[in-house]
Amino acid sequence: MSHRLDGEIALDLDGLSYRAPSGAVLLDAVTLHLLPGEILAVVGLNGAGKSTLIRLLAGLMAPSAGTIELEGRSYATLSSAERARRIAYVGQHDDADGRLLLHHYVALGTLPHRALLSAAEVDDRVDDALHQVGLAANAGARLDQLSGGERQRAKFARAICQAPSLLLLDEPTNHLDPAAKGALLSAAMRLGITVVTALHELTLIEAFATHVAVLQQGRLAAHGHPAEIFTPDTVQEIFGVHLYRLAHPHEPRILPSLDIAIGDHADFAPENRT
Protein backbone atom coordinates (compact mmCIF):
# COMPACT_ATOMS: atom_id res chain seq x y z
CA MET A 1 0.00 0.00 0.00
CA SER A 2 1.28 3.49 -0.78
CA HIS A 3 -0.08 6.97 -0.15
CA ARG A 4 2.38 8.55 -2.58
CA LEU A 5 1.58 12.00 -3.88
CA ASP A 6 3.39 12.71 -7.16
CA GLY A 7 6.07 15.37 -6.76
CA GLU A 8 5.89 15.49 -2.95
CA ILE A 9 9.01 14.49 -1.02
CA ALA A 10 8.44 12.89 2.37
CA LEU A 11 12.05 12.53 3.47
CA ASP A 12 15.01 14.41 1.99
CA LEU A 13 18.64 13.81 3.00
CA ASP A 14 21.30 16.12 1.58
CA GLY A 15 24.99 15.44 2.25
CA LEU A 16 24.23 13.77 5.58
CA SER A 17 27.40 12.95 7.55
CA TYR A 18 28.28 11.91 11.07
CA ARG A 19 31.70 11.95 12.71
CA ALA A 20 32.03 10.15 16.04
CA PRO A 21 33.79 11.81 19.00
CA SER A 22 36.75 9.51 18.25
CA GLY A 23 37.05 11.16 14.85
CA ALA A 24 35.83 8.14 12.88
CA VAL A 25 33.48 9.01 10.02
CA LEU A 26 30.46 6.71 10.44
CA LEU A 27 28.34 8.30 7.72
CA ASP A 28 29.76 10.24 4.80
CA ALA A 29 27.75 12.64 2.59
CA VAL A 30 24.63 10.53 2.06
CA THR A 31 22.06 12.12 -0.26
CA LEU A 32 18.71 10.55 -1.14
CA HIS A 33 14.98 11.18 -0.91
CA LEU A 34 11.76 9.22 -0.47
CA LEU A 35 8.22 9.98 -1.53
CA PRO A 36 5.26 9.42 0.81
CA GLY A 37 4.50 5.73 1.31
CA GLU A 38 7.82 4.49 -0.04
CA ILE A 39 9.77 1.89 1.92
CA LEU A 40 13.56 2.09 2.04
CA ALA A 41 15.64 -0.89 3.18
CA VAL A 42 19.16 0.11 4.26
CA VAL A 43 21.70 -2.70 3.91
CA GLY A 44 25.43 -3.20 4.27
CA LEU A 45 28.03 -5.08 6.27
CA ASN A 46 28.31 -4.59 10.02
CA GLY A 47 29.78 -1.15 10.62
CA ALA A 48 28.65 0.21 7.26
CA GLY A 49 26.59 2.97 8.91
CA LYS A 50 23.05 1.51 8.90
CA SER A 51 22.23 2.10 12.56
CA THR A 52 23.96 5.49 12.47
CA LEU A 53 21.68 6.58 9.63
CA ILE A 54 18.55 5.33 11.41
CA ARG A 55 19.53 7.07 14.67
CA LEU A 56 20.18 10.35 12.84
CA LEU A 57 16.74 10.12 11.24
CA ALA A 58 15.25 9.42 14.67
CA GLY A 59 16.84 12.60 16.03
CA LEU A 60 18.86 10.65 18.59
CA MET A 61 22.09 12.15 17.25
CA ALA A 62 22.85 15.40 15.46
CA PRO A 63 24.56 15.20 12.06
CA SER A 64 28.07 16.58 11.70
CA ALA A 65 27.14 17.94 8.26
CA GLY A 66 24.22 17.92 5.86
CA THR A 67 20.49 18.32 6.35
CA ILE A 68 17.35 16.26 6.88
CA GLU A 69 13.89 17.45 5.87
CA LEU A 70 10.62 15.74 6.74
CA GLU A 71 7.71 16.72 4.47
CA GLY A 72 9.46 19.97 3.58
CA ARG A 73 10.38 20.87 7.17
CA SER A 74 13.97 20.93 8.36
CA TYR A 75 14.62 18.71 11.36
CA ALA A 76 16.22 21.73 12.99
CA THR A 77 12.82 23.48 13.07
CA LEU A 78 10.87 20.54 14.52
CA SER A 79 10.17 20.62 18.25
CA SER A 80 10.54 17.44 20.28
CA ALA A 81 6.74 17.24 20.50
CA GLU A 82 6.38 17.51 16.70
CA ARG A 83 8.99 14.80 16.18
CA ALA A 84 7.19 12.52 18.61
CA ARG A 85 3.94 12.98 16.69
CA ARG A 86 5.46 12.45 13.26
CA ILE A 87 8.35 10.00 13.75
CA ALA A 88 8.26 6.55 15.36
CA TYR A 89 11.51 4.69 16.07
CA VAL A 90 11.94 1.01 16.91
CA GLY A 91 15.53 0.37 17.99
CA GLN A 92 17.45 -2.76 18.81
CA HIS A 93 18.25 -1.94 22.43
CA ASP A 94 15.41 0.25 23.74
CA ASP A 95 13.87 -2.32 26.11
CA ALA A 96 11.46 -0.95 28.72
CA ASP A 97 10.98 -1.87 32.39
CA GLY A 98 9.93 -5.54 32.46
CA ARG A 99 7.32 -4.82 35.15
CA LEU A 100 5.15 -2.87 32.70
CA LEU A 101 2.05 -4.59 31.42
CA LEU A 102 2.06 -5.03 27.65
CA HIS A 103 -1.12 -2.95 27.20
CA HIS A 104 0.36 -0.05 29.19
CA TYR A 105 3.66 -0.26 27.32
CA VAL A 106 2.02 -0.13 23.90
CA ALA A 107 -0.18 2.74 25.10
CA LEU A 108 2.97 4.84 25.56
CA GLY A 109 2.90 5.29 21.82
CA THR A 110 -0.22 7.43 22.14
CA LEU A 111 1.44 9.97 24.47
CA PRO A 112 2.22 12.51 21.72
CA HIS A 113 -1.52 12.58 20.88
CA ARG A 114 -2.94 12.01 24.37
CA ALA A 115 -4.47 15.50 24.66
CA LEU A 116 -6.66 14.73 21.64
CA LEU A 117 -7.64 11.16 22.59
CA SER A 118 -10.19 9.89 25.09
CA ALA A 119 -9.37 6.91 27.30
CA ALA A 120 -11.61 4.76 25.11
CA GLU A 121 -9.81 5.93 21.96
CA VAL A 122 -6.45 5.09 23.53
CA ASP A 123 -7.70 1.61 24.40
CA ASP A 124 -9.06 1.12 20.89
CA ARG A 125 -5.76 2.20 19.34
CA VAL A 126 -3.80 -0.16 21.61
CA ASP A 127 -6.14 -3.08 20.94
CA ASP A 128 -5.85 -2.54 17.20
CA ALA A 129 -2.04 -2.40 17.35
CA LEU A 130 -1.86 -5.57 19.43
CA HIS A 131 -4.11 -7.37 16.97
CA GLN A 132 -1.89 -6.25 14.10
CA VAL A 133 1.16 -7.87 15.71
CA GLY A 134 -0.63 -10.96 17.00
CA LEU A 135 -0.30 -10.11 20.71
CA ALA A 136 -3.92 -9.35 21.65
CA ALA A 137 -4.05 -12.40 23.94
CA ASN A 138 -0.99 -11.12 25.85
CA ALA A 139 -2.32 -7.65 26.64
CA GLY A 140 -2.32 -8.26 30.40
CA ALA A 141 1.11 -9.90 30.53
CA ARG A 142 4.20 -8.22 31.96
CA LEU A 143 6.98 -7.44 29.49
CA ASP A 144 9.39 -9.72 31.34
CA GLN A 145 6.98 -12.61 30.74
CA LEU A 146 7.28 -12.21 26.96
CA SER A 147 9.81 -13.88 24.69
CA GLY A 148 12.40 -11.83 22.82
CA GLY A 149 10.34 -12.04 19.65
CA GLU A 150 7.17 -10.98 21.45
CA ARG A 151 8.96 -7.96 22.94
CA GLN A 152 10.14 -7.02 19.46
CA ARG A 153 6.56 -7.15 18.21
CA ALA A 154 5.49 -5.08 21.25
CA LYS A 155 7.92 -2.34 20.22
CA PHE A 156 6.36 -2.33 16.77
CA ALA A 157 2.85 -2.13 18.25
CA ARG A 158 3.91 0.88 20.34
CA ALA A 159 5.17 2.56 17.14
CA ILE A 160 1.84 1.86 15.39
CA CYS A 161 0.06 3.67 18.24
CA GLN A 162 2.06 6.80 17.50
CA ALA A 163 0.31 7.06 14.11
CA PRO A 164 3.50 8.52 12.59
CA SER A 165 4.14 9.70 9.05
CA LEU A 166 7.68 8.24 9.21
CA LEU A 167 8.50 4.84 10.73
CA LEU A 168 12.14 3.99 11.49
CA LEU A 169 13.12 0.38 12.17
CA ASP A 170 16.58 -0.80 13.19
CA GLU A 171 16.88 -4.54 12.42
CA PRO A 172 13.19 -5.18 13.25
CA THR A 173 13.32 -8.91 12.41
CA ASN A 174 15.91 -9.72 15.07
CA HIS A 175 14.67 -12.39 17.52
CA LEU A 176 11.71 -13.28 15.31
CA ASP A 177 10.79 -16.71 13.98
CA PRO A 178 10.72 -16.96 10.15
CA ALA A 179 6.93 -16.63 9.85
CA ALA A 180 6.89 -13.72 12.31
CA LYS A 181 9.49 -11.86 10.22
CA GLY A 182 7.19 -11.90 7.22
CA ALA A 183 4.17 -10.94 9.33
CA LEU A 184 5.92 -7.91 10.86
CA LEU A 185 7.22 -6.62 7.54
CA SER A 186 3.76 -7.13 6.02
CA ALA A 187 2.23 -5.10 8.87
CA ALA A 188 4.72 -2.30 8.17
CA MET A 189 3.73 -2.33 4.48
CA ARG A 190 0.02 -2.10 5.33
CA LEU A 191 0.51 1.12 7.29
CA GLY A 192 0.89 3.00 3.99
CA ILE A 193 3.44 5.44 5.44
CA THR A 194 7.08 6.16 4.69
CA VAL A 195 9.34 3.53 6.24
CA VAL A 196 13.12 3.38 6.59
CA THR A 197 14.55 0.16 8.00
CA ALA A 198 17.98 -1.36 8.44
CA LEU A 199 17.84 -5.04 7.47
CA HIS A 200 20.19 -8.01 7.34
CA GLU A 201 17.55 -10.24 5.73
CA LEU A 202 18.52 -9.70 2.09
CA THR A 203 16.11 -12.32 0.73
CA LEU A 204 13.09 -10.46 2.21
CA ILE A 205 13.86 -7.05 0.77
CA GLU A 206 12.65 -7.46 -2.81
CA ALA A 207 9.12 -8.40 -1.68
CA PHE A 208 9.04 -5.76 1.07
CA ALA A 209 10.82 -2.57 0.03
CA THR A 210 10.18 -0.14 -2.81
CA HIS A 211 13.81 1.04 -2.63
CA VAL A 212 17.11 -0.12 -1.21
CA ALA A 213 20.18 1.85 -0.13
CA VAL A 214 23.50 0.03 0.09
CA LEU A 215 25.99 1.55 2.53
CA GLN A 216 29.69 0.74 2.31
CA GLN A 217 32.07 2.25 4.86
CA GLY A 218 29.58 5.02 5.57
CA ARG A 219 29.07 5.99 1.94
CA LEU A 220 26.04 5.40 -0.26
CA ALA A 221 27.30 2.74 -2.67
CA ALA A 222 23.99 2.17 -4.48
CA HIS A 223 20.36 3.33 -4.32
CA GLY A 224 17.35 2.27 -6.34
CA HIS A 225 14.69 -0.40 -6.74
CA PRO A 226 15.64 -3.75 -5.15
CA ALA A 227 15.53 -5.73 -8.42
CA GLU A 228 17.95 -3.23 -9.96
CA ILE A 229 20.33 -3.07 -7.02
CA PHE A 230 20.36 -6.71 -5.91
CA THR A 231 22.14 -8.16 -8.90
CA PRO A 232 24.32 -11.25 -8.38
CA ASP A 233 27.44 -9.17 -9.04
CA THR A 234 26.51 -6.48 -6.50
CA VAL A 235 25.60 -8.99 -3.79
CA GLN A 236 28.82 -10.91 -4.38
CA GLU A 237 30.90 -7.72 -4.28
CA ILE A 238 29.31 -6.21 -1.16
CA PHE A 239 28.36 -9.27 0.89
CA GLY A 240 30.61 -12.01 -0.42
CA VAL A 241 27.82 -14.49 -1.19
CA HIS A 242 26.08 -15.68 -4.35
CA LEU A 243 22.50 -14.58 -5.07
CA TYR A 244 20.18 -16.80 -7.11
CA ARG A 245 16.61 -16.19 -8.22
CA LEU A 246 14.62 -19.42 -8.27
CA ALA A 247 11.16 -20.05 -9.69
CA HIS A 248 8.56 -20.68 -6.98
CA PRO A 249 7.31 -24.28 -7.35
CA HIS A 250 3.62 -23.36 -6.97
CA GLU A 251 3.24 -19.61 -7.66
CA PRO A 252 4.22 -17.29 -10.53
CA ARG A 253 6.93 -15.47 -8.61
CA ILE A 254 10.65 -15.59 -7.95
CA LEU A 255 12.32 -16.70 -4.73
CA PRO A 256 15.64 -14.94 -4.04
CA SER A 257 18.13 -17.27 -2.40
CA LEU A 258 21.62 -16.79 -0.99
CA ASP A 259 24.24 -19.51 -1.38
CA ILE A 260 26.07 -19.24 1.95
CA ALA A 261 29.19 -21.38 2.11
CA ILE A 262 29.52 -23.72 5.10
CA GLY A 263 32.48 -26.01 5.62
CA ASP A 264 36.11 -26.03 4.58
CA HIS A 265 35.77 -23.18 2.09
CA ALA A 266 33.88 -20.79 4.40
CA ASP A 267 35.77 -17.90 5.97
CA PHE A 268 34.99 -14.55 7.55
CA ALA A 269 34.88 -11.68 5.09
CA PRO A 270 36.46 -8.46 6.34
CA GLU A 271 33.85 -6.15 7.86
CA ASN A 272 33.79 -2.37 7.86
CA ARG A 273 35.36 -0.91 10.99
CA THR A 274 34.29 2.70 10.67
Image: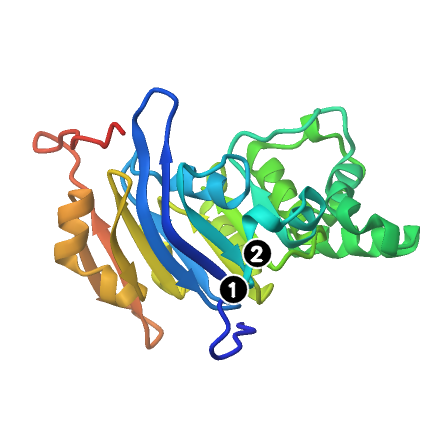
Q: Which of 143 and 24 is in front in this view?
A: 24
Tell me, for residue 166, which label it has, or none.
2
- Type of amino acid under label 2: Leu
Q: Do the residues labelled 1 and 2 touch (CB within 8 Å)?
A: yes
Quick one: label 1 or label 2, which is nearer the N terminus?
1
| Horizontal and vertical percent position of residue 48 | 29, 38
| Horizontal and vertical percent position of residue 31 | 34, 55
Would you say 272 lies left or right of 113 here?
Answer: left
Using the rendered view, name the quadrant where residue 149 is placed.
Answer: top right
Label 1, residues with CA under 10 Å away: few <14, some 14-19, many ≥20: many
- Type of amino acid under label 1: Ala
| Horizontal and vertical percent position of residue 222 | 24, 56
Residue 205 appears in view: no
Rendered position, 268 above or below 249: above
- Count of labels in the image: 2
Label 2, residues with CA under 10 Å away: few <14, some 14-19, many ≥20: many
How far apart marks 1 and 2 lie (CA) works out to: 8 Å
Q: Mark 1 points at which residue?
A: 10
Under tag 2, what secondary structure?
strand
Rendered residue at 52%/68% (across/down) = 36
